[in-house]
């Protein structure tokens, strides 16, 4: 008869700072999570909606947008308007229904091809360089929006003058990250960070190829900057995905990815905890598709039939209060003055992260269906050798901390040197391994407060010895789940 047990792991540090772990087995109980304060959202499919404000800014492209938390509004700065081409220094706000042109103290320097991000620590918006103060000139100044004014920050160091670079704000490390872009003579591949006072050039061991006009955002659910695509300035259009953790860049090899492109729009949806990408230019065609990045893979999104047609060089950002991906202006054959908003669906996801510890058969594989409220969630470990009788399924609410310590946690004290516990073992379920696999299933309550909540899981393979002792054999990658509808 197949039996189940629950294992609790207690950890502590002794005076010698040696982490000890003890394991005890008790009878399994039904898994119950305390409901979290989660944002409720509709079960409607993903859709783009054309807004109909009474009046709008003129048609324009190649400016920048970001959320201004001081007033709960989107801010739009700079850009180019056509006929004749004119560089803009305007600052506009959008509250979801009305446009307002602002008259900030000190004014703004006209620019285009720049980026703008929000410092989530002090709610200031940061702008760097771009083409300024004329259509053809290049700048490397740093500007910050205080809530009412643009302020020039005098920094001791700064990246070289450029435009069309990647720009994102790392909310954990408290710095803006800049990559690449185009100077007057070349496309770059340098990495810089701005801490609110000064710029520092980083020297990561691995660096993506030089590029411009890529998509780049900080994905808080991953704790990393995500970069996709771009153009090398001569002939190559990229379709690669990279992540940056503050120390190094690493390429991601998703099974599914958007086609190669540049000049697209991308934001981090902080409510649904994923990066969303829209449109761009393939080098021969303007694109209008939508994709979402879940950590190890991209997912194409089926949206409403009507989508923005001006999908390159747009102003774009995410409004976390109204939970909207906001897109304005851009180019799609002609300059646009339309404002569109994207509402994503409450779809859950499952992805893997970290490194597995293999057996003689290779890597044990962690898979899962999509977790949903009021539905069974099944997590499986495959490619299990016959020497493994039991798989421990760890479930937790974090993949960064556990018991006051940091993750990953080295499993060497349990006899599995070189392997790591990647998730907090708030609950461990024990399942027998048969036929090269083990499976754990439970059902989430029918509670909408669980929507968009994250969970983590990992499989640890265990061999029972004749004397009643045991040894750990291997571990899977970590699993990262978001509960959907």
Image (cartoon, rainbow, N blue to C red):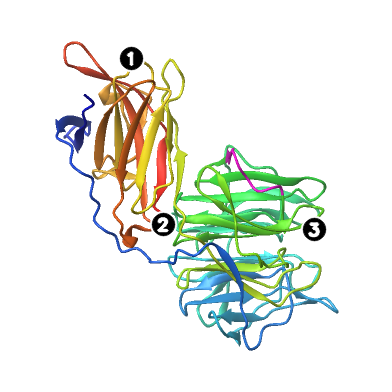
What's the residue at 33%, 57% (across, down)?
450
Element at badge 1? loop
Q: Is residue 255 magenta?
A: yes
The residues bearing labels 2 and 3 have C-alpha atoms spaced at a distance of 49 Å
Instruction: Characterize the local packing of mark 2: few (<14), some (14-19) or many (20 or more) Cα atoms within 10 angstroms.
Output: many
Front in this rendered view, residue 395 or 214: 395
Is 303 drawn above or below residue 481 in the view shown? below
Instruction: Characterize the local packing of mark 1: few (<14), some (14-19) or many (20 or more) Cα atoms within 10 angstroms.
Output: some
Is tag 1's residue or tag 2's residue first in the polypeptide sequence?
A: 1
Label count reads 3
What's the residue at 46%, 61% (across, down)?
270
Instruction: Name the image quarter holding the C terminus.
Output: bottom left
User: Viewed as shown, does residue 118 lie left or right of 371?
Assistant: right
Residue at far right of view: 84
Label 2 belongs to which residue? 485
Is tag 2's residue or tag 3's residue first in the polypeptide sequence?
A: 3
- Magenta range is 251-260
User: Viewed as shown, does residue 74 lie left or right of 27?
Assistant: right
The residues bearing labels 1 and 2 have C-alpha atoms spaced at a distance of 38 Å
Q: Position of residue 297 (x, y in %)?
A: 55, 44
Element at badge 3? loop
Q: Is residue 367 magenta?
A: no
Q: Position of residue 301 (x, y in %)?
A: 58, 55
User: Viewed as shown, does residue 130 lie left or right of 51?
Assistant: right
Label 3 belongs to which residue? 184
Is 79 drawn above or below residue 463 in the view shown? below
Front in this rendered view, residue 443 or 283: 443
Label 1 belongs to which residue? 387
Instruction: Characterize the local packing of mark 3: few (<14), some (14-19) or many (20 or more) Cα atoms within 10 angstroms.
Output: few
Foreground disc of the pair 2, 3: 2
**Dominant secondary structure (helix, strand or loop) of the stretch shown in magenta:** loop
Q: Position of residue 267 (x, y in %)?
A: 56, 61
């Amino acid at each position: 008869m197949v039996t189940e047990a629950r294992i609790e792991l207690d950890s502590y540090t002794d005076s010698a700072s040696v982490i000890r772990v003890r394991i005890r087995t008790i009878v399994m109980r039904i898994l119950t999570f305390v409901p979290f304060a989660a944002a409720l959202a509709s079960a409607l499919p993903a859709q783009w909606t054309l807004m109909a404000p009474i009046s709008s800014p003129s048609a324009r492209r190649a400016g920048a947008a970001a959320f201004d938390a001081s007033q709960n509004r989107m801010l739009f700065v700079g850009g180019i308007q056509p006929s004749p081409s004119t560089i803009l220094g305007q600052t506009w706000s959008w509250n979801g229904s009305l446009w307002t042109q602002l008259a900030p103290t000190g004014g703004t320097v006209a620019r285009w091809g720049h980026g703008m991000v929000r410092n989530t620590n002090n709610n200031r918006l940061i702008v760097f360089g771009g083409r300024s103060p004329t259509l053809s000139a290049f700048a490397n100044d740093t500007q910050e929006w205080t809530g009412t004014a643009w302020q020039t920050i005098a920094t001791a160091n700064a990246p070289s003058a450029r435009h069309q670079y990647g720009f994102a704000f790392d909310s954990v490390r408290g710095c803006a990250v800049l990559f690449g872009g185009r100077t007057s003579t070349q496309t770059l591949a340098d990495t810089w960070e701005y801490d609110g006072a000064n710029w520092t050039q980083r020297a990561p061991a691995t660096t993506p190829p030089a590029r411009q006009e890529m998509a780049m955002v900080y994905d808080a659910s991953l704790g990393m900057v995500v970069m996709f695509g771009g153009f090398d300035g001569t002939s190559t259009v990229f379709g690669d995905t990279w992540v940056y953790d503050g120390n190094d860049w690493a390429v991601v090899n998703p099974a599914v990815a958007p086609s190669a492109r540049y000049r697209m729009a991308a934001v981090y949806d902080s409510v649904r905890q994923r990066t969303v990408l829209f449109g761009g230019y393939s080098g021969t065609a303007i694109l209008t598709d939508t994709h979402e990045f879940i950590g190890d893979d991209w997912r194409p999104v089926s949206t409403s039939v009507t989508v923005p047609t001006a999908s390159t060089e747009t102003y774009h950002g995410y409004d976390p209060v109204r939970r909207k991906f906001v897109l304005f202006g851009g180019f799609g054959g002609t300059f646009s003055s339309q404002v569109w908003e994207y509402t994503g669906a409450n779809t859950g996801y499952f992805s893997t992260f970290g490194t597995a510890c293999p057996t003689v058969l290779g890597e044990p594989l962690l898979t899962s269906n999509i977790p949903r409220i009021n539905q069974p969630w099944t997590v499986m470990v495959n490619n299990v050798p016959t020497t493994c009788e039991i798989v421990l399924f760890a479930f937790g609410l974090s993949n960064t901390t556990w018991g006051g310590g940091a993750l990953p946690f080295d499993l060497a004290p349990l006899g599995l040197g070189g392997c790591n516990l990647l998730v907090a073992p708030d609950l461990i379920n024990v399942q027998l391994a048969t036929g090269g696999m083990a499976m754990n299933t439970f059902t989430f309550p029918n509670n909408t407060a669980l929507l968009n909540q994250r969970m983590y899981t990992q499989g640890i393979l265990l061999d029972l010895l004749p004397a009643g002792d045991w040894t750990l054999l291997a571990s899977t990658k970590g699993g990262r789940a978001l509960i959907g509808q």
